[in-house]
Image: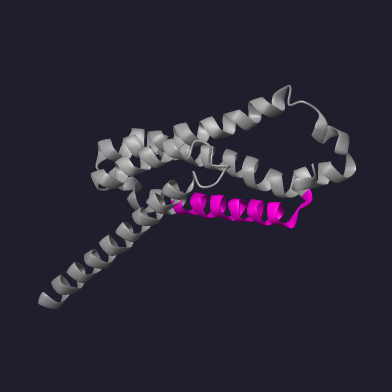
Amino acid sequence: MASSLEPVFLINGSVYFGAFCLLMLALVAIYAREGHRAGKLWTIGACAAVVGTFALGANVGWFDVFVAPWIALVAPEAMKTPNVGSLPIGGFSSYVLFLLGWVLFGIASFRARVFPVAISLAIVVSALIAWPSAFPPYGVPFGLTIAGLGVWMIRRSTAANQIAESVALAK
């Protein structure tokens, strides 16, 4: 209970919430840019990853920063109550949805060859490592994988633009 009111706890939760928001925006941008290249399984994988990212971001970030401190102040006895009922089910399901969503997205990316094989496989492996991502440092490999995907996409875009410019100049 006391830790939920500590500034370090609140800063950590805020950083996690921000990271999950960025991850969600990255996923939407990836889908907008590459969605035309993939099939239905990739779309299903992207949608599952959106749901999983939203659920875990709400669980780990938003709840820990806004709800837990409020409960600690107005109903401290609730923090001592055993986790029963729907709360542990909801919490656990957010981890499962995140894991399944990103693993499916990685597998679908591999099958559709939307990204290089190494990146698609890294998405799967790092999502498996990120299973307990509410606890550092398990989310780091996943974050680095998505950052690597972003670098690949930027480089690919730059190369495509250079080719298009060369073709336009040749005409």
Q: What's the residue at 40%, 56% (across, down)?
A: 147
Q: Is residue 7 magenta?
A: yes
Q: Quadrant of residue 94?
A: top right
Specify the quadrant that holds the N terminus: top right
Left or right of 1, for residue 14: left
Q: Position of residue 61 (x, y in %)?
A: 64, 47
Specify the quadrant that holds the C terminus: bottom left
Magenta stretch, overall SS: helix
Q: Over which residues does the magenta segment extend?
A: 5-26
- Who is closer to the viewer here, 76 or 149? 76
- Type of colouring: one colour
Q: What's the residue at 83%, 43% (across, down)?
A: 72
Whether residue 165 is visible: yes
Q: What's the residue at 55%, 49% (across, down)?
A: 20
The single residue placed furthest to the top in the displayed view is 85
Q: Position of residue 83 (x, y in %)?
A: 73, 26
Q: Position of residue 56 (x, y in %)?
A: 58, 40
Left or right of 26, for residue 61: right
- Who is closer to the viewer here, 83 or 38? 83
Left or right of 153, for residue 74: right
Asked if 13 appears above or below 166 in the picture, the reply is: above
The single residue placed furthest to the left in the displayed view is 170
Left or right of 73, for residue 50: left
Q: Is residue 142 magenta?
A: no
Whether residue 171 is visible: no
Q: What's the residue at 34%, 60% (across, down)?
A: 151
The single residue placed furthest to the bottom in the displayed view is 169
Please count the marks in the image. Answer: 0
